[in-house]
Amino acid sequence: MVDIGLRDVIYHASPVGNSTGPADTVDVVYFHRTVRCATCLRAEEWTRYTVETHFAAELSSGKVTFQSIDYQDKGNNDIVERYRAYRLQLFINAIQDGTDHIEEATDLYTLLHNKEAFVTALKSKIDERLNGES
Amino acid sequence: MDLTGAMASSNIPVVSALVLGLMTALSPCTLATNIAAPGYVSRGVTERRYAVMTGAFYTLGRMVSYSAIGIIIVAGLEIPGVASFLQDFGGQVLGPLLIVIGVLMLIANRIPLDLGGGRLSSIGAKVADRGVLGGFLLGALFALAFCPYGALLFFGVLIPLALESAAGVALPAVYAVGTGLPVLVFGILLSAGVARVSILFNAVTRVEKVIRIVISIVFIGVGIYYVVLWIQS
C-alpha cells in the first residue's frame, strides 16, 4: 500500500535515470545539522579522508568534489533543494552532460563504526561513477 | 565487512532491525538518555523484579513510539517534517520536561510537607514511585528524542527496509527492542550491584534515598544538556 510518492520521499534523491557512461564529475556532498554530534563529525572526517586520500588527482582537477553543508543554514537553500536534504545525509552525484544523477549512500550508514569498511565502500562507489559501471 | 555491518545489512530484516537498534543505542549521541534511563530502571533496590519490570516497560514504551512513527510515515506524513520535529524534540520538549521531573523528584526528598511544598513534593514522589508506568513513559519520550545519527539509521536505513520487507510493520518495534536492550541489561546489573552493596552495609533505605537524589540530578543534568544543545542551534 505504499505509493510512489512515499518511496520517493524515502529514496528521495534516487537517480533520475541510471547513469551508464562515465560521469563528467562526481560530487560527494555531505549534509549535517548546525550542532554536530560525534558520529556526524566522524562521517564527515572519513568521507573527506576517502576523497583526499584516494582521489587526490581528481580532486585537484575538479573531476571529484567534496562539500560539507549545514542544511539548517538558510544560506545553503539552493543546494539543500537540489539534493532535497533534510537530515544527516551523504550523497554521490554523478554529473553527466550537466545532468544530476544523485544517489544517497545509505549502505554506508551502517559502517560508521568501521573506518576501513567505510572508506573501501565509499571509494568503490566513487570509482564506479567515474568509470561508469553503475 | 565486519560482523556488525554485515548483520545490519543482513538479508533477514528482523536481524537488521535489531542490530540497527543496538547501533543507535550504543552510539555516543544517544548517550545522554542512556545515562538517565538505567538509573531510573535500577531505583528499586529492595525488589529485583522491579528493575526487570521497569526496564521491560521502558522498552515497551520505545516500541509504541517507534511503531507510531512508522504508522505516521506510512499514513503519508511528510518525512522531512517528521524527521526535523523529532530531532528538535530533545531540546524543545524532553529537555525542559526532564528538568521539571528531576526538580520534582528532588523536592520530594527535600522539602518538608509543612513548608508548603506538600503538593509539589507529592507529585515528585509519585513520579519517582510509579516505576512501571514511569518506565513506559520514559521509554516513549526518550524514543522520540532522535539524535542525528539515530535519525539517519531510522529514516535512512530502517524505514526503507521496513517498506520493502514482509515483516515491515514489526520492524520499528524490533528496532525498539534493540535500543532498549542495553538499558535493560545495564539497569538490571546496576540494580543488582547496588542491592548487594546496600544489603551488605545494611543501609537499604539510605541507599534508595541517595539513588533517588542522584537520579534527580542526572535527569536535571541531561535536561540542561538537551536545552543547551538546542539553544546553540
Image (spheres, coloured by chain):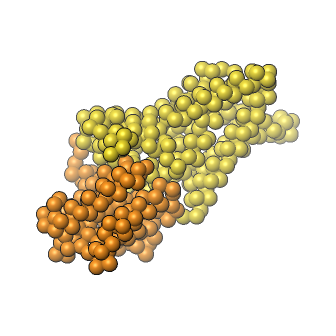
Chain colours: A orange, B yellow
In the image, is residue B163 above or below residue A88? above
Coordinates of residue B30 in the picture (x, y in percent): 52, 47
In the rendered structure, the answer to whether residue B58 lies left or right of residue A74 reads: right
- Considering every residue shown, the one lying at the far right of the view is B114
Please identify the quadrant where the C terminus of chain A is shown.
bottom left
- Residue nearest the viewer, comparing A106 with B224: A106
Closest to the observer, B69 or B55 = B55
- Residue at 51%, 61% (x, y): give it: A36
Answer left or right for A54 relative to B231: left
Q: Position of residue A67 (x, y in %)?
A: 38, 70
Look at 47% across and 55% down and name the residue there: A39
Is A56 situated above or below A7? below
Q: Total number of numbered labels? A: 0
Q: Of all residues shown, which one is farthest toward the bottom?
A: A61
Which residue sits at x=47%, y=38%? Answer: B179
Image coordinates of residue B78 in percent, x first then y, are: 34, 54
Q: Quadrant of residue B52?
A: top right
Q: Quadrant of the N terminus of chain A?
A: top left
Q: Give the camera-side residue of B189 and B115.
A: B189
The foreground one among B96 and B147 is B147
Residue pictured at 79% horizontal, 23% vertical: B201
Residue B78 against residue B71 in the figure, above or below? below
Observer able to see residue B120: no
Q: Picture coordinates of residue A24 (x, y %)?
A: 20, 74
Answer yes or no: is residue A50 visible.
Answer: yes
